[in-house]
Image: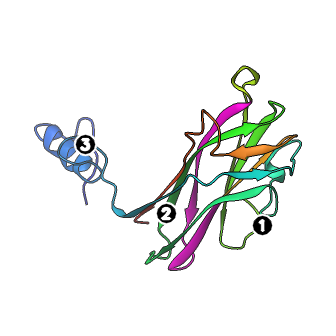
Amino acid sequence: MAAKPVVTSSDGTWGTELNAFLDVGHNTDGTLKVELLQMEYASTTTTKTTTDTLVGATTAFTSSDGVEVLTKEITGLTVGSRIKIEVSSPVAVSDAATAYGAIFVDSVATAISTFGNDSDSTAGGNTSLSFFGFYTATATSHTFKFRVVGASGTTTVNNCFGGEGKTLMCITEYAA
């Protein structure tokens, strides 16, 4: 096992010891070594609308709030691996209020990640929700869900910014 060089006891071998230590976690080009196991993408342009509202902290967001925008099942996972779920979605709120997004796993009612973003009243209440969350795989298959709700009024997903909306989800599995 590589060890960091020690001041006064690594004379003449300092560079070799430091390089051996850095090689454990870095590629030869200096980037970090990350063992990517799989990456999956999901997207939709389907317009979803909800009049459900969520007032207050996004931590109150449950799997029954708002509207489910996108669902993706991932199979072949390694139990204990780290999963990163990234979401980006255009959202319009009719009264230019805050839009909230949340990522859920399987049938669990509590979100693994939530995000709120104020919409721009000068842009017709349009905004974008872009955020991510991490999850440790507890099974070889999980279903990831992205839901959206507004603080008030009607919230519409994918039918804003001139109708060019598209929700994207990227799910990446990393070795434990």
Indicate which disc residue 109 carries. Answer: 1
Local SS, label 3: loop
Element type at mark 1: loop
- Residue at figure coordinates x 30%, y 52% from the top left: 33
User: At which x and y percent is residue 15?
Assistant: 15, 38
In the rendered image, residue 151, in percent from the top left (x then y), is placed at 85, 41
Query: Alpha carbon of mark 1 to alpha carbon of mark 2: how far?
Result: 20 Å
Residues 147 and 112: in front is 147
Task: Give residue 82's mark.
Answer: 2
Main secondary structure of the magenta stretch? strand
Q: Earlier in the sequence, mark 1 or mark 2?
A: 2
Q: Would residue 152 appear left or right of 122 to someone viewing this image?
A: right
Amino acid at pointer 3: Pro
Asked whether 158 falls inside the magenta stretch, the response is: no
Among numbered discs 2 and 3, the one appearing first in the sequence: 3
* Residues rendered magenta in the picture: 125-145
Residue at label 3? 5
Where is residue 22? Give x, y as percent.
25, 46
Q: Amino acid at mark 2?
A: Arg
Nearer mark to the viewer, of 2 and 3 = 2
As drawn, is 37 to the left or to the right of 168?
left
Residue 128 falls within the magenta-colored stretch: yes
Question: CB under 8 Å between callouts 1 and 3?
Answer: no
Residue most extreme to the left: 12
